[in-house]
Amino acid sequence: MGSPMINLIKKGFAALVLLMAVSTPALADTLNSGDTAWIIAATALVLLMTLPALALFYGGLVQSKNVLSVLIHCVTIACVASILWLIAGYSLAFTGDGAWIGSLDKVFLMGVTTDSLSGTIPEIVFFMFQMTFAIITPALIVGAYPERVKFGAVVLFSALWLMLVYVPVTHWVWGGGWLAALGVMDFAGGIVVHATAGASAIVFAVMLGKRKGFPTAIKPPHNPGYVMVGACMLWVGWFGFNGGSQLAADGGAGMAIAVTHLSAATASLVWMGIEWAKFGRPSLIGMVTGTIAGLATITPGSGFVGPIGGVIYGALAAIICYYAVQILKHKLEIDDSLDVMAVHGVGGILGTLLTAYFVQSSLGGAGLPDGQTVLGQLWVQGQGVVVTVAWSVFATWAILMLVRKTIGLRTNEEEEYNGLDVTSHGEHAYDL
């Protein structure tokens, strides 16, 4: 009697284990309060990167008569992007299974409730986290056109650019589109954020034309202190940008934050060293420009590489982005005023390509995908970069042609001379 009873208990236990194993996938969509709390905090950090960090960073770099115009550009873009993200941006980027664009299933967040989940966090939290990326990306382009652009042109361009460039590329890479299927690695936006913004910035700068007196007669940045404060706030906010992209409060998020910090610190020192050797003294603006280069470059690989990778990313970022500034601004004389392409574009592309090598587990990285080689992954990364840059250039050109033919792009010479703070907004930054 004892033996049949024991066998029955064993069979019952085995059935229970099997049932639990079959049910395990459903647990993947169980709310995790720790993950949720971290992504809420990361959302606030990434919004801080635009409001006010990027605004201060860019505002300090322009002349005093144009600082308010830069601040209002950043705030306005944040507001416009938020509403467009609600209307259709989020839905087109993150729903549906199309290769090139998502669906309209969640326009105005239809069907999304407080109980809706995206992995282990509420979907409304995921919506907000991704919204902050949609805000800062077009805001980065502000650095290409300050001191000479019409305010209406900024508003119209940013709205169209968000929907025609940022949203499709986001779907390609993060929303299950064709680049995701190809196996592109872009943890937090080397392609989605920095390559798109950088490529579009250079097109905008060329089509808008140079500032009067560029490059010899342009006054230096009016407030290096603003620049430093903005850059350091960006540095802290980037922990949410990269660490939050893990979408979990775990060791992966911790490693992303660590390599982000190491890359920024290394790039700051190397950029400072280059200037010190070349000019005999380091500059504050140069050092914190290196900070941003290091942060932009580590972004695509932050969830894939280890600490040594973070240091090497930072060193290469400083060297390559420094000379990109010299080539674009001083040799080609393209007035990408605040170096969006040279720092963000070049940095994001560089980091995207480096990831194919530094992802290797032998270098402390997460490891290549099964069956993939370094050269194979580099080919995948390169395809993502080339197609994204090409689309960004073409779409930006088309949008700017439309804006130019409707409301115009550039202010007149008198407005540019007097400064946009007064002529476009009727305000003074300083009572002098």
Image: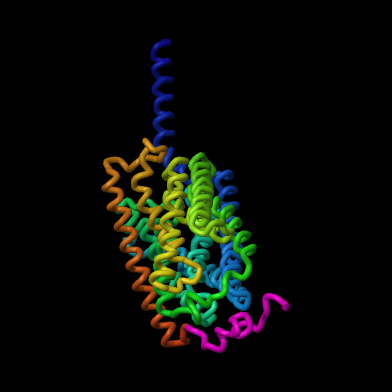
Boundaries of the magenta span: 410-432
**Left or right: 134 with respect to 363?**
right
Instruction: Name the quarter where the C terminus is drawn.
Output: bottom right
In the image, residue 237 above or below residue 204: above
> What is the x, y in percent for residue 302?
45, 48
Of residues 392 and 162, which is closer to you in this image? 392
Residue at 50% x, 82% y: name it.
Answer: 212
**Left or right: 71 with respect to 296?**
right
Does residue 425 show up magenta in the picture?
yes
Instruction: Name the quarter where the N terminus is drawn.
Output: top left
Of residues 242 and 418, which is closer to you in this image? 418
Residue at 59% x, 48% y: name it.
Answer: 37
In the image, residue 115 above or below residue 90: above
Q: Is residue 127 visible?
A: no
> What is the x, y in percent for residue 201?
43, 70
**Left or right: 155 with respect to 427?**
left
Does residue 115 show up magenta in the picture?
no
Quarter where residue 92 is shown = bottom left
Quarter where residue 399 is shown = bottom left
Residue at 54% x, 57% y: name it.
Answer: 280
In the image, residue 288 above or below residue 13: below
